[in-house]
Image (tube, grey):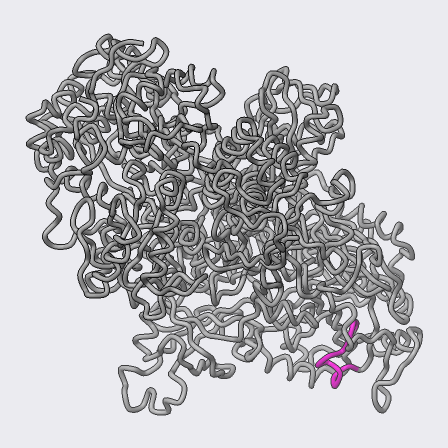
Amino acid sequence: MAIFEGTRLGEAQAIMARYPEGRQRSAVMPLLYLAQSVEGHVTREALQEVAVLIGVRTAEVEAVASFYTMLRLRPTGTHLIAVCTNLSCSLRGARAVYDAAHEATGIAPGAETSDDGEFTVHEEECLGVCELAPVVQVNVANHDVVTPERVHEIVERLRAGEVPEPARGPAVESFKAASRMLAGFEEAGSPAVTQAGSQAGSQAEGANA
Amino acid sequence: MRGSELASVSPPQQVVTLTVDGKEITVPAGTLIIRAAEQVGVEIPRFCDHPLLEPVGACRQCYVEVEGQRKLLTSCTTTATEGMIVRTQNTSDAVHAAQVANLEFLLLNHPLDCPICDRGGECPLQDQALAFGPGESRYREAKRVFPKPLPLSPLVNLDRERCVLCARCTRFCDQISGDRFIELFARGAAEQVSIAPGEDFRSPFSGNTVQICPVGALTSTPYRFVARPFDLTTVDTVCPHCSAGCNIKLDMRRGEVVRQLARDNYDVNDAWLCDKGRYAFRFPDAAERIATPLIRDHGLEPASFGEVLTRVAEWTDGKRVAILTGGRLMDEDLFALSKLARTVFRTNDLDHRRGGDTGSTAAEHHAAANPMAVTYKDVERADAILVVGLDAEQEVPILHLRLRKAARRGARIWVLHPRRTRLHDVATHVLCAPGGEGRLLAGGAGGADATLDEALAALREAGQNAVVLAGERPGAADAALATAQAVGARFQYVTRRANDRGALIAGVHPSLLPGGRSMHEADEVEHVWGPLMNREPGRDAMGILQACADREIDVLLLIGVDPLRDMPDAGLVGRALDNVAVKVVQSLELGSLERYADAFLPATAFLEKDGHVSTWEGRGQRLRAIRGRDGISLADWEIFASMALACGGDLGFETLEELHEEMGRLVGPREESLTTAGVGAPSPSAEAAESEPQSPGAPDGEGLVLFTYPLLVDEGRLSEGASELKAALADEAFVEVHPADAERLGLTDGGRAVVRTDAGEAELPVRVTEHVAAGAVFVPFNQSGLAANTLLSGEMLARASLSAAGDPATGDLEPDRKPATVAAGGGA
Amino acid sequence: MSETRRVLTAHWDDPGVIALAGYEDAGGYRALRAALGKTADELIQLVKDSGLRGRGGAGFPTGMKWSFVPRDTGKPTYVAVNFDESEPGTCNNRELVEREPHALLEGTAIAAKAIDCHLAYIYVRGEYLWQARVLQRAIAEAYAAGYLGSNIMGGDYDLDIVLHRGAGAYICGEETALLSSLEGFRGQPRLRPPFPAVEGLYESPTVINNVETLMNVPHIVNNGPDWFKEVGTEKAPGTKMFTISGKVERPGNYELAMGTPLRVLLEEHAGGVLDGKAIKAWTPGGSSTPFLTADHLDVGLDFESVMEAGSLLGTGAIMVLDETDCMVEAARRLVEFYAHESCGKCTPCREGTWWATRVLGRIEAGYGRDEDLPVMAEMGENILFRAFCALADGAVSPIQSTLKHFMGEYEAHIREGRCPVTGRGPGLDAEPVQEAVTFTPTGPFQIQGATP
């Protein structure tokens, strides 16, 4: 086994232990996330190895993997830039943000990943931060009220090797790192949860007080 | 009969009464509306619904209106309730409109390629579109485009553009076969049936998905672009390949078979057929077919039946005659053969069995005397099932599906076999030493196996709903019968080949007379047949061959059998054929017997015959001739009748009706067979019980025992011409070894090994697997690359040694890696 | 309408409640302690008496849902928390959890106690990566403090809570699809019956509750059912989280009494329409609820009143469009969402949303035809209530409500070949565009051909 061996096999077993005995199929999504955190996307080998781990056929794993958009079956950039273009965001200018993301990353029209493999830009359905539209996620970490200029800035900083601070929580350095968190693993030095939540347009601001 | 028995022990069924389009109908509670409607003759259109698959409600074509419900309901997912008033498309405009609208959705992305689609002319989607679809599409946008077709295997192709995503195929693989090679991938408008990259749809049931596909999305390679439904003549018959007895529809174009499909029979094959039954249909038209009698003069020359039979009469007059046959003949043929042997040739040297499968006398006796002791339905309804010495998927595939169906209903299943079977996901396997089933069941092998104890306890508890099935692994069936009797379970000896069961019933067997009678009961037979000169049990198949080799037989009749291929001692067969003076072959062709045959009698092929074939249950099923006889061939029983006359005897029947009348007197349902068919019946034959079954036993030290049986798709005669089937499912010969043995012997998975037995040796690719018993070595009987009977000495077991190929030093230089050799016990 | 008050958002001004200490200081886990002293039946009765209805959209009475769970089947029971908040325009669950995660754990634990459950899963949508991390940390704190795990608070009750992250599928918010997903399958809805309460997760009795619903539970336990009913309407007591987004000055999550009119939310809380423009249309409960218009500003935001006005309260997610927004574009974008999120299982949803998206896109782009509008209207009728689950009905809402309220705008698009509001579009002389659409979640197919 190439992906799930050594420490990572232990992690896979820890994931499977989240579910009752005999129900290890439930672990398919986190296991795929874990594989994605290694390879940057869900590879054919990952599908096969996960199938073996949970005792199903490879087709059953791919059936699941291909159903969910955050499990990516195609090579994906180091950084995944997801731009919400659903109604609340597009009312606030998301289309221009999306176009700017393409422009800044230099991704060819119709493509989703830059030739250098650094960026994937993905048009996203509602990301659930409608009050702070338009919303962009960089490696599944949120950036609120994003303008086209801000997208250019984010991309420039990523190119420079920095990961801009998101609106909530610490920056996530890569799509692989995000996938590892999605598998339920925190890196050493967990985020400071005392960090405040969202900062704009809510009752916390006393709008409702 | 069985049904009423069950009804008497089941709680009274709740029923509900509803009306469908004004027609009142009472159905069992839980019946779906779509099924209830069928019962009053109302056909509600559907695509995803299939009576043997769980409801899914995906296609949304089967809307009905139910009074009191705001929305239309899908009749394939809604159960009937008391007083329900249902209106279908026949009486509700709203329902009709909804169905038309849904059809429009289904057709949006459907390609207009009906003219080149194999399904055209028999396509539910096409039929419904014609019946009430709009003539013109309002869809002006571009359609979905997929590359097509996507080959799922050498047998099955997928055209995703035509697919309506009803999920019948994927549900079949999930719920029926358990071979989940294909799945629905992606979602929304991109949802599609697909297969994991690099994999083949390697299921021996794959063709069922083609048949239940309601559109032309799944097509089969052998039928691709071959014919149109209106070109075909369709006839009903029964599959000739194994004892499952699947009911089939056979499509012929200009007399040539071009397709076989499953025909619904819920008592037998439900609606399924294995891929061998579906795709191995070219053998009746094989090029080697000979349809003229032949006689050896200088070479084999064409002759008339009369000439050949006259010569047979001369050859056999006052001579020692023996008869071997196989599993291909019909009940009528077998009965006539049994009578021919006993009354004309005065011999009991008569056998239909593959030599080496002997030694299950009691089980054979039980099978011959107890038709329908266990049926498909019994298996389906059982609570606890023990399967002994049978690889159901490979040997009787539709029985395998029934076992899976039982498991799905909650039955607990145990399999006692030297090698894991494809029931592994629904059954508990106990891997025993080859030939060791009996010792394990008897609890004699150093303390009974705990898992087996659990199985036996479950069987006892299940009472009426306990079933023991035994297959042909040496020694398994008698031990299983004894176990079944001990725990009070229903028992069935499952013979593999198409009419092995019929041969047992007819007494084509050295110690069984028709109807499962032993030689002690010969009086009953003489009452019908007249005096039998010989009441001593005859020689079995291997005994006959040995006697031929020892020149103790003068004339050998080979009826639809190729001993060179079928008998587990190729060397002995060769000596037998060399030494017996006269060989008469009656078959479809000569094959490798050409150089031995002194005469050839052409028999009609399965499509050309009229008569019965018995399933493994003992259920006789009628087949009718569906095309004219080839050349001047005759039905086997007709040849036997003529041969009897030529030899101065008289079988006493000239028509099938006369033959049936006589069969009715000897092998028809007998009172005692029915009474002994029940639970915990005592052994029907005291004699059989007396004759201690020869137990090949298990090796009692370290060492290797080779065992073998035929896999489903092999080099067998009836698979000739089935190239796509073989490409999809046939394995090259291999040898399977347990990891512990492999390690000891220095063998690696994927490497090659030399297998040596007393009879011969072969070099084969190695499969190291923990799913074969330690100490056991499995080779398939008849795959390309090895005729396993070259390794056998009259048993389906042999002591064997293995060494890595290309390792000449084995044994001599490294003593501790010397291949182990241990007797199979009782065998050689 | 009664007075409102802040219950779920009472501590939003206190960033400390994100951590256990702050939550305890604010009175946290008192309700769980009290609940542990009550029987399952008492807890169910308490919630029944409160009249709490599910906040996920359907408004089913929560106590009744719990009471359907058989506790004597010999199988385990499960609580599955639906934190798959994905309905466009909806984001109150996200903020509730990221500010006060322990409140969800406490509500979950009480629900679990009420059905004798010892293992609960929180299904959190994958995109809520940070919120899942917050929850994960809170779970760790709760275990360490003895609020979760074995012998909770020294008693004999055990409960494990496990996070399960989704991976980008709106349909998993549908409860049976959520269960499919949690069991490791494609997130496709399942037939009911059997209902999840009887045969849910792992074929065992299961309660599935929304985040906001569960967060109300500790307050009901602490303060009693009568207190809970002091605000809201008779049929829908309590407060409700409303998300207001789009063209307003202060978009955000606001906790108001059930039944608060939109005008109050918009003008008193959200600061009115952005840049002083006029409101044109709004959704009362997310993308799946039919648009209402400026004529409906005084509709009370509760289940019954919104329904009377021709829409649904849904998730209480108000998306506001102003006079400069194109309704065809809005409808197209929302229907596109449903086409993207359709699970593919059933025909009307899979094919209908696909068709509607493409027709709407063509009209929006200026290539509409006269026959498109009756076809669209009929298409809506043919999808509505015909699909396997409610997802497709959601797609019909923007189609039917825009056709109903903004027919003129559609007609103008077709008549003029461009949008009458934004002016976008090629006009009448334009040549039809060649189609080259790629719509490929896994890259399997291409669109070919041209739109005439």
Residue pictured at 13% horizontal, 28% vertical: C13
Residue B791 vs residue B394, the one in the foreground = B394
> Quarter holding the N terminus of chain B?
top right
- Image coords of residue B387 (percent x, y): 49, 51
Residue B659 vs residue B507: left or right? right
* Residue B642 image offset from top left, x and y in percent: 89, 66
Q: Nearer the viewer, residue B167 or B373?
A: B167
Looking at the picture, does residue B452 appear above or below residue A116? above
- In magenta stretch: residue B160: no
Q: Residue B437 or C16: which is nearer the viewer? A: C16
Query: Could you tell whether C193 is left or right of C259 in the image?
Result: right
- Up-down relation of residue A203 to residue A62 (above or below): above
Q: Position of residue B634 (x, y in %)?
A: 87, 66
Quarter residue B498 falls in: bottom right
Is there any visible trace of residue B761 in the rendered image? yes
Q: Is residue B520 visible?
A: no
Residue drawn 40% across the image and 53% down it: A65
Q: Give the magenta range.
A: B586-597
In this view of the protein, which residue sits in the foreground, C145 or B176? C145
Q: Quadrant of residue B630?
A: bottom right
